[in-house]
Image: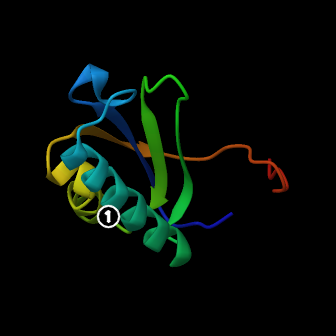
Amino acid sequence: MSDKPQWIYVLRLMRPDMGPDPTEREMEIVDRHFQYLKSAHERGETVLVGRCEDFAFGVVVFEAPSRAAAVAFMDNDPAVAEGVMSGELHPYRVALMRGESVDE
C-alpha cells in the first residue's frame, strides 16, 4: 500500500431518477466521468472506484498529495463539474484490502 495521502469522495445523483432513467445529456456526462476516472486509474491515482447497484451513491478512493489537489481532482470530475452529481470529499485511509498484507 502506498504511503501517499488518500482521499474519498462520495458521489450522489443530483436528480434521483437519473440512475434508472438518464437523459441523453446525463449519459454523455457520465461517460466522460467514467473516462476521467479510467484515465486516473491507468495513471495509478485511484485505489477504488464504484457505485451502488441501486444508484444510492458512488465512491472514489484516490491518492493526492494535498487537500487542494484532492479538491481539484474531485472538482474536475465531469459529473461534479457539470452538476449531475454532488461530491463530498474526506481524508481517508484504507486499513485492509484483499491481496495486501496487514501491518500492525
Q: Position of residue 98 (x, y in %)?
A: 81, 48
Q: Is residue 84 visible?
A: yes
Q: Is residue 64 visible?
A: no
Left or right: 80 with respect to 20? Answer: left
Q: Position of residue 81 (x, y in %)?
A: 16, 53
Q: Is residue 42 above or below residue 78?
A: below
Most extreme residue toward the left is: 82
**Element assignment for label 1:** loop
Image quadrant holding the N terminus, namely bottom right
Q: Is residue 39 above or below residue 58?
A: below
The answer to which quarter of the image holds residue 14 is top left
What colouring does the structure picture have? Answer: rainbow
Left or right: 1 with respect to 10? Answer: right
Q: Which residue is mark 1?
A: 66
Q: How many marks?
A: 1
Q: Residue at x 46, y 41 (%)?
A: 59
Q: Position of residue 103 (x, y in %)?
A: 80, 53
Q: Residue at x 58, y 66 (%)?
A: 3
Q: Is residue 42 above or below residue 89?
A: below
Q: Position of residue 87 (x, y in %)?
A: 27, 40
The answer to which quarter of the image holds residue 13 is top left
Q: Residue at x 73, y 43 (%)?
A: 96
Q: Residue at x 47, y 58 (%)?
A: 62
Callout 1: few (<14), some (14-19), or many (20+) C-alpha neighbours within 10 Å? some
Q: Is residue 46 above or below residue 104?
A: below
